Structure formats: C-alpha cells, structure tokens
Amino acid sequence: MGPTIAPTRLGTSNALAHFVIRMISPPRIRPSSSSSNPDTHDAVQPTGLEARSQSTSRMQSNSRIGTGSRNEVRIESLTGARLRRHADYQRAYAGSRKRQSSSMSWFLARQTPAYAGAPLPAGPRVGLTAGKVLGKAHERNRIKRRMRDILRRHVDLLPLGFDLILHPRRIVLTLEFAKLEAETVRILQQALTEAARMPQEAPDAKTRGLR
C-alpha cells in the first residue's frame, strides 16, 4: 500500500471558497426570447429601403400639417399665363389706360384675338416689363424674379378674359418682400374689381381694327 497524499492546504481553501460563493449568490435569470412584453426588448431599427420608406412617409405627413391654414403658401405655375409676344403687349396697351401704385404702374385690357377669326387666349395672362432704366441686367433680372415669385403664389387672382401688364419701379429691388407681395395682391384685387365693371364688348368691336 502506497503512501497517502494529503490535499494541499491551498487547493482545499480555493475549492471551499468557490462552493460558498455559489451557495450565497442569487441564481441568474435569463430573459425569455418569447416574452410578449414589448418593453423588455429593444426596438428593431429599420434599415435599407424600409428606413427610407418610413422617412419619406414622415416627411409627407409633416408636409400635410397645417393644410388649409391661411398662412399656407401656394406655389403655382405661370406657364400659359404669361404675355410673351410683342404684338400681345401692343394690343394690351392699346386697350387699356395706365394705373399707378407706390412701386409700379399697371395696365389692364380685355383680351382680343390676334387677327380676325382667331380664338381668344385660353385664360388670363400677365406680363412684366423691366427696362434698362431700372439698372443693370442682374438688377432687372432680380426685379422680375421677385415679381414672378409673387405672381406664382396668386395667379388665381388674375381676371379671366383680361391681360395685365406690370411695370415695376426700381424700389422693387430692395422693398421688403412682404410689403411688395401685399401691394401686388392689392393690384390684382383691384384689377378683378375693374374687370367686373367693364362692359362686354361686341365681337365686331373686338376685331374692327384687325381687318
């Protein structure tokens, strides 16, 4: 019979310490993956096309907030509502008289056919004139851009069956935009009132000077 090997004091102490720790420590509880409580799980973040789709939906939803408000800005197109030909301007000048406002003058004329038997324009039209007296080319372009921006917002105020020509002055270049818009809207409303008061011309009178 061989000699008995007694366990070392260090090994016995370590084993006893691990046993005591396991006995006094609370059991670890792992969360169940099948739990039905959504608060116990982190939300899954969408990626790729799903994330872009949700972002687009949020943007569209935000853009609809305030729809119908008085302060809502309407942006429409002036395509088809602009005077472009020199002859159209001349007919409008011939059939109107000059009106004045603080920052521009304007002319309102009933639309007439370009020649005998020609159809009338499909809708109201507006023209802008900015001559060299207003400044350099970039200044005149800025004046016309500001005026067109306002007219696009209020194109629905143009009187049906009429042509309107605006002659902005140089002050339009630096005038506060809100004041310029308010003045332009007043002109459009006045044009609507004057158009309603103008008597309807007979067809022969419209084309008398075109034959």
Image: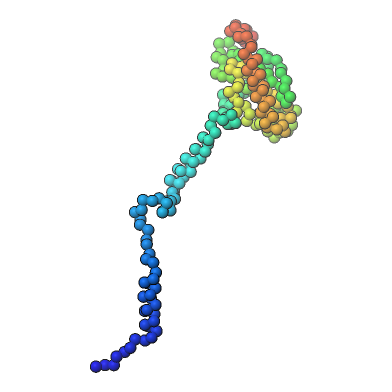
Farthest-out residue, left: 1
Q: Is residue 21 above or below residue 33?
A: below
User: Residue 60: horizontal and vertical position, in percent?
Assistant: 50, 38
**Which residue appears at 37% of the width and 86% of the height?**
8
Colouring chosen for the image of the structure:
rainbow
- Count of number-bearing discs: 0
Q: Quadrant of residue 22?
A: bottom left
> In the picture, residue 29 is in which quadrant?
bottom left
User: Residue 42's x, y, as percent?
Assistant: 43, 53
155 w.r.t. 51: above or below: above
Question: Between 158 and 59, which is closer to the camera in this rendering?
Answer: 59
In this picture, residue 38 sits left or right of residue 116: left
Quadrant in the picture for the N terminus? bottom left
Examine the rendered structure and indicate whether residue 13 appears above or below residue 177.
below
Q: Position of residue 118 (x, y in %)?
A: 56, 13
Q: Does the image show residue 91? A: no
Q: Nearer the viewer, residue 80 or 48?
A: 48
**Left or right: 12, with 145 as reference point:** left
Q: Is residue 99 visible?
A: yes
Pick whichever, 166 or 94, lies toward us.
Answer: 166
Q: Residue at x 67, y 31 (%)?
A: 178
Q: Answer with left or right where residue 12 lies relative to residue 161.
A: left
Q: Position of residue 167 (x, y in %)?
A: 70, 24
Residue lying farthest to the front in this orientation:
24
Residue 125 higher or lower than 178, as above or below = above
Residue at position x 69%, y 20% from top?
Answer: 106
Residue shown at 53% from the left, 32% from the top = 67
* Quarter of the image that includes the C terminus: top right
